[in-house]
Image: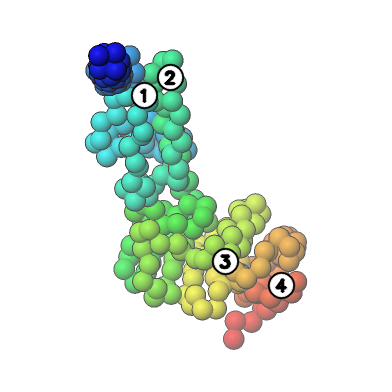
Amino acid sequence: MVKKKSGAKRWLKLILAIVLLLFVVGGAVYVFNYSGLFRVKNINVTVTNGINGLTLSASDVFGGQPYTNILAPLPSIDMSKFPYISSFTITKNYFERTVYVQAVARQHEFIWCMTATSDCYWVDGTGLMFENAPQVSGGNLNVISDSSGRDIGMGDYALPSDLFANFAADINLLNGLEVPISSIQISDINHEEMVVVTDSGPEIYFGFTFDPVASGDEAVIRQAMQSSDWSKYCYIDLRTMYKAYTSFSCA
C-alpha cells in the first residue's frame, strides 16, 4: 500500500509539473503575441544621399510583410527591388519599441548613354547602372557616349571595377582642371580607352589600365592648357603610362 501511494504521488507531481509548464508556455506565448508588451510602435525609414525627395515606407522595404513584434526576426529585404539603394542598416530600440531603417541611396555620378539603343542610365561610383537617366545634349563631364556595341543596361556595370576606378580618376582630373568638354566617347572597349573632345582645344586620349594621377597626366594637361598652342593641338595622347604624345596634325 505504501508503494502504491508513493507512485500515485509521483504521477500527481508529474501532472502538476506538466500543467504548470503548459501554463508558463501559454502565458509566454500570450505575452509575446497578444499582450502588446512587445508590439512595435513605429518603424522609422530614412533615406540618405537621395535626390528628388526619395522616400521609402516600411511596407516598401519589407515587401508588404507586417512586422509587429520587436523580438521577432526581421522580414528579409529583397535588394533586387531596390537597385537605387546601396545598403540598408536596421537597428531596434527595445525601450521605445521602434525600428530604425536607414537606406543609403546610390550617388548619381555619371550618365552613361548606349548609342546603339539610345538608352541612358545613371551610374554610381562603383560603375553600376542603377536607374534610367535622361538624354543630355551638350558638353558635360558626367555624360558618357558609349558606342562600343556592348549589350549592357540596367543592373550591369559600365566597366570592370579596376577599369572604372581609373576612368573615374580621369574624369576627376579633368573636372579639377576645369577642362571645357564637348563630349566623352567610348567606341571600342577592347582598347580600354576613351576620347575626350574638348571645346576649342585638342582631343585627349585616356587609357583605363592605369591611374592618371600616378602617371602625371594632370601636369601634362595643365601645361598644355596654359600654352598658347592649346587650340592648335590636334590631340594629346595619354594612353601610355608616364608618356604623353601631342600633335598639331590630325592626319
Report the colour scheme.
rainbow
User: In the rendered view of the protein, which quadrant contains the N terminus?
Assistant: top left
Are the residues flagged by discs 3 and 1 in contact, CB closer than 8 Å? no
Q: Give the residue type at disc 1.
A: Ile
- 160 relative position to 156: left or right: right
Are the residues flagged by discs 2 and 3 in contact, CB closer than 8 Å? no
Are the residues flagged by discs 4 and 2 in contact, CB closer than 8 Å? no
Dot placed on the residue nearer the N-terminal end, 4 or 2 = 2
Which residue matches tag 2?
94
Q: What is the crowding at mark 4: few (fewer than 14 residues within 10 Å), some, or many (at least 20)? A: some
Give the CA distance from mark 2 to mark 1.
Answer: 7 Å
Give the CA distance from mark 4 to mark 2.
Answer: 57 Å
Dot placed on the residue nearer the N-terminal end, 3 or 1 = 1
- Residue appearing at x 43%, y 68% in the figure: 146
Q: Is residue 208 above or below residue 218?
A: below
Q: Nearer the viewer, mark 3 or mark 1?
A: 1
Give the CA distance from mark 3 to mark 4.
Answer: 14 Å
Q: Nearer the viewer, mark 1 or mark 4?
A: 1
Which residue matches tag 4?
241
Give the CA distance from mark 2 to mark 3.
Answer: 46 Å
Q: Is residue 142 above or below residue 77?
A: below
In the structure shown, which secondary structural element does the residue marked by tag 4 occupy? loop
Which residue matches tag 3?
163
Dot placed on the residue nearer the N-terminal end, 2 or 1 = 1
What mark, if any, has residue 70 been given in the picture? 1
- Residue appearing at x 45%, y 43% in the figure: 87
Are the residues flagged by discs 3 and 4 in contact, CB closer than 8 Å? no
Q: Give the residue type at disc 4.
A: Met
Are the residues flagged by discs 2 and 1 in contact, CB closer than 8 Å? yes
In the structure shown, which secondary structural element does the residue marked by tag 1 occupy? loop
Q: Nearer the viewer, mark 4 or mark 2?
A: 2
Q: Nearer the viewer, mark 3 or mark 4?
A: 3
